[in-house]
Image (tube, helix red, strand yellow):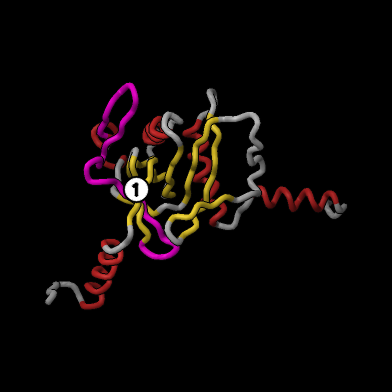
Amino acid sequence: VLKSQQTTTAAIGDLSNFLAEAAADRNNIHGVMMDINGVGVLITGKSFVGKSESALELLYRGHTLVSDDRVEVFQKEIGVVYGQTPKMTERLMEVRGLGLIDVVDLFGVKAFRKKKRIMLIVELIKWDQANNYNRLGLEEETEKLFDTLIPKVTIPVQPGRNTATLIEVAAMNWRLKSFGCNVAKEFVDKLNKIVKGEAK
């Protein structure tokens, strides 16, 4: 028997929401989870590629950390996947050369939240001149987490590239695409019109 001061509808809604999360399958992913201007970004990549350092720069710019090093992910429903911090590492980041830091102590309470929906995956890889990287952005990558396909961006990393800025712009660009603005497609459509002699 359950007793609540809420109305029946509100209580059932909250209970259903709680059970959907509590009963969900969970996986652990090596990476960093950030909230960048409201966009949940899961940053992945091999060790020493610069995930935590990029996250630290993003924190310095006013964005929010969800989890560093290990992200607990679960699918609330098909199409909705969340990333959250393990209890043991809440508020903490490991930065090589500095050790463990508490982001709330350093940057304030807005620097941390416990969970966030994963809207974009950014994979950092070491730059390889032999690779043919996506230059226009027409080829849209995805990665499957549970039963959900998440948009993905692969960013090659090399000295001199500001990785934090690239991740920040990737999040902003994803938001624009979600509003129906695709710069790469608009460019190609314009180019095709020029080729066909239709452009004014």
Please state which amino acid type lies under the numbered disc 1. Answer: Asn
Establish if 194 lies above or below 104: below
Is 96 covered by the magenta stretch? yes
Residue 61 spot, x, y in % from top left = 40, 34
Residue 56 located left or right of residue 134 = left
| Residue at horizontal 71 percent and vertical 48 percent from the top | 187
Is 44 covered by the magenta stretch? no
| Residue at horizontal 30 percent and vertical 23 percent from the top | 98
Residue 71 spot, x, y in % from top left = 34, 45
In this view, the residue in front, 118 or 126, is: 126
Quarter of the figure with residue 198: bottom right
Q: Name the residue at the right extreme.
A: 197
Residue 170 spot, x, y in % from top left = 52, 43
**Residue for badge 1:** 28
| Residue at horizontal 49 percent and vertical 43 percent from the top | 122
Q: Residues within 10 Å of mark 1 (few under 14, many from 20)?
A: some
The part of the chain drawn in magenta is: 76-102
| Residue at horizontal 20 percent and vertical 76 percent from the top | 7
In this view, the residue in front, 127 or 105, is: 127
